[in-house]
Amino acid sequence: MVIPSVSLSHGELTLRPIHMRDARPLERELMLNRSWLRQWEATNPGTFNHLDTKAAVRSLLSYGRSGGGLPLVMVVEGQIVGQINVSGITYGSLSSASIGYWVAERFAGRGLTTIAVALVTDYCMRVLGLHRIEICIRPENSASLRVVQKLGYRFEGRRDRYIHINGDWRDHDCFALCVEDLPDGLLTRYLTGKTNTP
Ligand SMILES: CC(C)(COP(=O)(O)OP(=O)(O)OC[C@H]1O[C@@H](n2cnc3c(N)ncnc32)[C@H](O)[C@@H]1OP(=O)(O)O)[C@@H](O)C(=O)NCCC(=O)NCCS
């Protein structure tokens, strides 16, 4: 399925598809935020993982064109402040996908990623017709765990040594929501405070 061009926004935040011309500003942010991001970054086992933003954007675009992913950038006041990517999009009897994200350190704590995840979850369910969205997080990543807690994503369990992150296979906690959980959508549920947060 070809995914329609998407632009999602709420308040100061806009999410739009990544472009090749974003490679340079993205690389600047990734360099600036090296120590902030490194410990949570996916790596390829057995290879030297050097930063090649152009290749990374090219690969995201090609994956997006195949229909398997939806690579978006987070924009505030015209500036790229992070990324949110949908991957593993499948239809039919699974109809599911995963979400991953990061934001620049100087924009952390403004609720941007929490709003971005709500917007993207709603888009995947309401426009793409997906049934279940999953987010997997290292148990040490308290900031990311807060994002799913605030949104009421349900804890499903621990996957041992699940994803190669920062040079080794790391355990991840898996969280998910299904379309039946969200009769009015996730953004509305979050903004109206109906999410149960611990
Ligand atoms: C996880 C992350 C995306 C959250 O983004 P965000 O836009 O700051 O999200 P929110 O503003 O909703 O804040 C979420 C939590 O982060 C924590 N936080 C806020 N500001 C922070 C800061 N400056 N430094 C560290 N943690 C902070 C708080 O616990 C906050 O929860 P709260 O709202 O209950 O206080 C961001 O911390 C990040 O990019 N981290 C590095 C990459 C990463 O971990 N990606 C996710 C991998 S699963």
Image: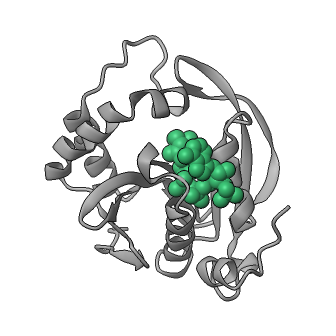
Against 51, residue 136 (above or below) is: below
The foreground one among 191 and 94 is 191
Residue sitting at 24 percent across and 38 percent down? 28
Residue shown at 50% from the left, 51% from the top: 108
Q: Is residue 150 visible?
A: yes
Q: Quadrant of the C terminus?
A: bottom right
Residue 154 in the image, given as x and y percentages of width and height: 79, 60
Furthest residue toward bottom: 184
Establish if 172 lies above or below 197: above
- Residue 65, horizontal then vertical, whole percent: 28, 57
Residue at (74%, 79%) from the top-left corner?
180
Q: Is residue 97 visible?
A: no
Tell me where residue 11 appears, x and y as whole percent: 43, 79
Whether residue 170 is situated above or below residue 135 in the rendered picture? above
Percent position (x, y) of residue 75? 32, 63
Q: How many marks?
A: 0
Query: Which image quadrant: the N terminus?
Result: bottom left
114 on left or right of 173: left
Residue 14, by quadrant, is bottom left
**Residue at image coords 33%, 65%:** 76
The furthest residue to the front: 106
In which quadrant of the rendered view does residue 160 lie? top right
Identify whether 6 is placed above or below 172: below
The answer to whether residue 176 is left or right of residue 19 is right
Colour mode?
Answer: one colour
